Amino acid sequence: MSALLEELPVILGAFWLTVRLTLATAVAALVLGTVLAAMRVSPLAVLRTVAAAYVNALRNTPLTLVIVFCGLGLGLVLDVSFSDSLSTNYLWLSIIGLSLYTAAFVCEAIRSGINTVPIGQAEAARALGLTFLQNLRHIVLPQAFRAVIAPLGSVLIALIKNTTIAAAIGVAEASLTMKSLFEQHQEAVVPIFLGFALGFLVLTLPVGLLFGWLAKRLAVAR
Amino acid sequence: MTEADRSTSLVNLEKVNKHFGALHVLRDIDLDVTRGEVVVVIGPSGGGKSTLCRVINRLETIDSGAITFDGHSLAVEGRALARLRSEVGMVFQQFNLFAHKTILENVTLGPTKVRKIARGQAEQRGMELLERVGIASQAAKYPAQLSGGQQQRVAIARALAMDPKMILFDEPTSALDPEMVQEVLDVMISLARDGMTMLVVTHEMGFARRAANRVVFMSDGQIIEQAAPDEFFTNPSTDRARDFLSKILTH
């Protein structure tokens, strides 16, 4: 217990990195996932095919592989660099990997939401003269998002936990920090583990509650 | 509208054919609607009436034939098609009001996003139109809070907000409770009196008698006969029309 208190600043710092990883990835994955979902329902067959191939590839690849590829493949071998600081660079590479992976799940959630919007909604918008993109933006996507807030919450919870895989390329988020604290405080591995597990609960539980509440509040009455 | 305008064609369908799989829903349809004309399409269910309505703004594609609107052949896709649709209003059986938008937003969406009219101006005009259909007091509500009849009147206001050259009505009263049918028909009759060009698919024979310039009788994907309402209802020229009328006008 004393080890836990002693290392509190380190632990909080690690979770702060977890939160930043999560937020940056969530924004990027939401944008990319929305674009992919739009491609999957677009009238152009080539866009539909590309998006479907993307989703199938990323959704079926282990995240560890994606992260390791981004860190070692892109970072070390292909020399993709965002910062002179090595740790910042790996942080960005892990955000890219997490975003590419999570976007596939966001896309599928949004696509299932699009399927809940009655066809008449899009027809009425087309009949008014809205273009395909206007139709998506003003009519279909706003209703689709409201229908899938709860599943998107699940994607976000999975993402919070998935950020631990960034440890594989040395990003000092919560799980990697836990590992190094184990080495420093071998007498206190159980309390340290419980502390970190609790930390994740503190992040994930409110997300589930918040998204459940939002889903009810923003539901579209038909 | 001048007399010269009145006599010119607004929509013309020539030899239009459409299949749904093996079903031949439109067979060699020839139809001309002139400006200011109110054409009522009646006939048994599954006869192709709704499809006829929907091919005019290309919510359904056609397999062969030609459709012209206001002198131009129907665009296949893209912005030209969107422009055509903005000039043809459509009122659906199921209303199809945008469920996540207020009544006023439903009416202003087209003008602001498609016509790029300033919001304030669109809202002022939207309120005038809601006033006209008797729903102005509900402007801030959402569609699900309104009755079917009210929703359908909003849908008519939404179509009018685009200043369309024509409005298509696809069975506008078929999904309504009986006591709400008349309030919608009243709005449609007043539109017809004001000279709006209308193509109306309906089972409301009373509306056809009162407001139509012409009745088109469709069955099995074909136009069987067309005539002025008085003539059609009192003296139909085909057996199928006679048979249909005898079934619906017995009481």
Image (cartoon, helix red, strand yellow):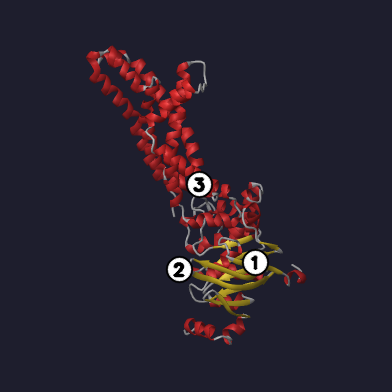
Q: Position of residue A26 (x, y in %)?
A: 45, 33
Q: Is residue B30 left or right of residue B103?
A: right
Q: Which quadrant does the C terminus of chain A fall into? A: bottom left
Residue A171 against residue A66 in the figure, above or below: above
Residue at x 37%, y 38% (from the top left corner): A154
Q: CA gap, disc 3 to disc 2? A: 41 Å
Same chain for mark 3 and mark 2? The answer is no
The chain carrying label 3 is: A
Chain identifier of the residue bearing label 1 in the image: B
Which numbered mark, 2 or 1, is in the foreground of this view? 1
Q: Amino acid at mark 3?
A: Arg
Task: Determine crowd level at label 2: few under 14, some 14-19, many 20+ residues with C-alpha closer than 10 A.
Answer: few
Up/down of A220 relative to A152, above or below: below
Q: CA distance from mark 1 to mark 3?
A: 30 Å
- The residue sitting at 46% across, 49% down in the picture is A114
Which residue position is annotated with label 3? A48
**Residue under circle 2?**
B177
Percent coordinates x, y for residue A185 in the rendering: 26, 13
Q: How many marks?
A: 3
* Secondary structure type for disc 2: loop
Q: Disc 3 vs disc 2: which is toward the camera?
A: 3
> Is there any visible trace of residue A205 in the rendered image?
yes
Indicate the secondary structure of the residue bearing disc 3: helix
At label 1, the amino acid type is Ala
Q: Quadrant of the N terminus of chain A?
A: top left
Q: Assess whether mark 2 and mark 3 are in contact (beta carbons under 8 angstroms).
A: no
Q: Which residue is mark 1?
A: B66
